[in-house]
Image: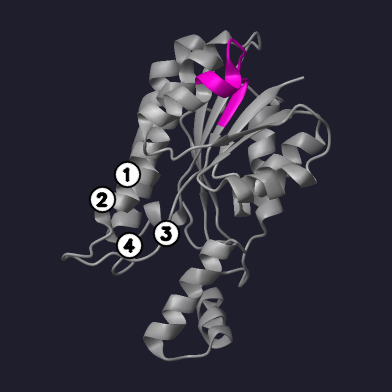
Amino acid sequence: MKTFLITGAGTGIGAAAAKHLAGHGATVILAGRRANALEEVLKTLPGKGHGLMPVDVSDKKALNVALKEVMGDNALDGVFANAGIGGENRYGESDRWAEIIDINLSGSYYTAMECLPYLKRSKEKYRNLVISSSCLARFGVPYYTAYCASKTGVTGLTRALAVELAPSRILVNAILPGWVNTEMARAGIQKLADHTHKPYEKALKEQLGFLPLQKMSEPDEIAALVGFLFSNVQTSITGQCIDINNGSHMI
């Protein structure tokens, strides 16, 4: 039985990934800042032996301690570094630049580095690290400077780690979702609606109108992609930034 750790597991894509992986027989360690949210996800998971790890991934010392407490001498077969925050930032006293960079980019790096010893303990021939980026790593959005920068940084982090960890047979990839039907996405649409003085439904329709498929993805779809990467049915995908965005960006 494989063991996977998921950060940002209390909601959205992280929670969906936990359910998907547990449903395929894996043991899942749920990590996130809100213990109560993790506990609610834990109740929905099939199987036994799953764990909780309440921690802020931007605090590398706390992450190190939490991993030691939860993992002990055990191994991880895969890590989904999914924790992140969104929203605008504007230069000034209330600028959220540092907060967004610390969690989205530095938190992904700390997660990878602190989990590395546990991945190297795995007896699997290939281990996996998947990091959540965003379609906003592909193009800019006004007042999303920190978010765009953090998610673009994740793609560079992914490529560098893929080369660095290849000798250890650790495959490293990023996923780049577009709009996904999550709490964070709905909050983003609501802010757009507020700024433009439009009803939520109209703002949503306008945003989806930019997409060739004119829809949001569901968290289960993103979870299935993560599950595929963790499955090791292939062992040749590494250093890739995989777009799953309903056509918002094509290369």
Q: To which residue does mark 4 refer?
A: 140
Q: Is residue 164 left or right of residue 47?
A: left
Q: CA distance from mark 2 to mark 1?
A: 6 Å
Mark 4 or 1: the one toward you: 1
- Residues rendered magenta in the picture: 68-79
Q: Is residue 95 left or right of residue 83?
A: left
- Residue 224 location in percent, x, y? 70, 44
- Corner quadrant of residue 28: top right
Q: CA distance from mark 4 to mark 3?
A: 14 Å
Q: To which residue does mark 2 refer?
A: 98
Q: To which residue does mark 1 refer?
A: 102
Residue at x 81% of width, y 29% of height: 48
Give amino acid for label 1: Asp
Using the image as rendered, state which of residue 216 and residue 84 is in the foreground.
84
Q: Residues within 10 Å of mark 1 (few under 14, many from 20)?
A: many
- Corner quadrant of residue 29: top right
Give amino acid for label 4: Gly
For residue 223, say whether it is visible: no
Q: CA distance from mark 4 to mark 1?
A: 20 Å
Indicate which disc residue 86 carries.
3
Mark 4 vs mark 3: which is more N-terminal? 3
**Element type at mark 3:** loop
Number of numbered discs on residues: 4
Mark 4 or 2: the one toward you: 2
